[in-house]
Amino acid sequence: MPLWLILIIIGVVLLVLGLAGVAKILLWIGVAILVVSLVLALLNRAKK
């Protein structure tokens, strides 16, 4: 399972449990990793 997906799942679980501060940080980190990996994948695809 990718790291970004794990972070987003943990963030959602923490949101449900009421730990909004920590959950928001994990969600943003997960989204940032996802975006960076998508951009890198697109750049690698464009080079080929």
Image (cartoon, grey):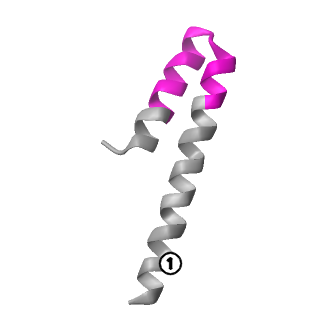
Q: Residue at x 49, y 75 (%)?
A: 42
Measuring 63% from the left and 39% from the top, which residue is drawn there? 28
Note whether 35 is above or below 12 in the view shown. below
Q: Which residues are magenta?
A: 8-25
Q: Is residue 3 magenta?
A: no
Q: Would you place residue 42 above or below residue 35 in this image?
A: below
Q: Measuring from the top left, give residue 19's x and y in whole percent.
A: 62, 12
Residue 10 on the magenta span: yes
Location of residue 22 in the rendering, given as x and y in whole percent from the top left corner: 63, 20
Tag 1's secondary structure? helix
**Residue 11 versus residue 48 in the image, above or below:** above
* Quarter of the rendering occupied by the N terminus: top left
Q: Which residue is mark 1?
A: 43
Residue sitting at 51 percent across and 52 percent down? 34
Picture quadrant of residue 15: top right
Q: In front: 15, or 31?
A: 31
Q: Identity of the amino acid at label 1?
A: Leu
Question: Where is residue 43 shown, x and y percent of the image?
Answer: 50, 78
Given the current orientation, which residue lies at the most extreme left position? Answer: 1
